[in-house]
Amino acid sequence: MTTWLVLVDLQRIFGEPTSAWFTPRFADAEAGAVRLRQLFPGRTALTRFVAPENPEGAWVPYYEQWPFALDPDNAALYDLVPALPPGDAVVITRPTFGKWDPATRAALGETRDIVLAGVSTDCCVLSTALAAADDGVRVRVVADACAGLSPADHQRALDTMALYAPLIEIATVEEILAERGLAR
């Protein structure tokens, strides 16, 4: 079984302290993601959240609260952080919180096993993990390579995902490294 690393939304819009969507502890998630990426050459997916051109439905009031996200002058904020250049990774761009869908499944082939990290634990990571698990994929969420909007929100999201065991497991960077014989 081929395992893929899926790094969720490690973008400037969530990592820059001046952004309205800054995620505290982003730097910790980014550092963990960089360590994990070395383990998955040719089997890494980098996801990007982008605002839709024309929000519809419930997204209309959402973007009324966050109008900066629709401003074309802020487009560069949606770039991936420099520490995680695309290289040989598959880049998945969606205007949704969850990044697991039929197109993602097709992009990753027949994988039934993913290692998941990124931001924010309590939004896009959670949404992606639940959809992948529902699709029959084993999901290992790397807690110390994720960051939430607060420590409490991060932990609540991890606790919620842990309820889905054995479909979703919570792991650490060191545990994933140890699996591959690279633990310190």
Image (cartoon, rainbow, N blue to C red):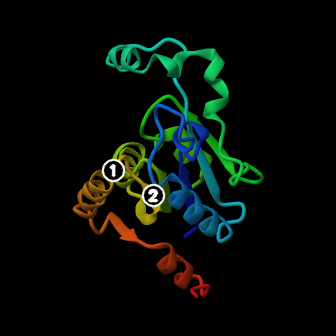
Alpha carbon of mark 1 to alpha carbon of mark 2: how far? 11 Å
Measured as percent of width and height from the top left, residue 77 is found at: 62, 32
Residue shown at 62%/69% (left/top)? Answer: 35
Residue 150's disc is 1
Residue shown at 68%/69% (left/top)? Answer: 38
Residue 182's disc is none
Q: Is residue 105 placed above or below 4 in the rendered structure?
A: above
The outermost residue toward the right is 87
Q: Amino acid at mark 2?
A: Cys
The number of numbered badges drawn on the structure is 2
Q: Is residue 70 left or right of residue 59?
A: right
Residue shown at 40%/13% (left/top)? Answer: 56
Of the 4 image quadrants, the one containing the C terminus is: bottom right
Q: Amino acid at mark 1?
A: Ser
Considering the numbered disc 1 on the image, is that residue within a helix, a strand or a loop? loop
Measured as percent of width and height from the top left, residue 134 is found at: 33, 50
* Residue underneath mark 2: 146
Measured as percent of width and height from the top left, residue 80 is found at: 65, 42
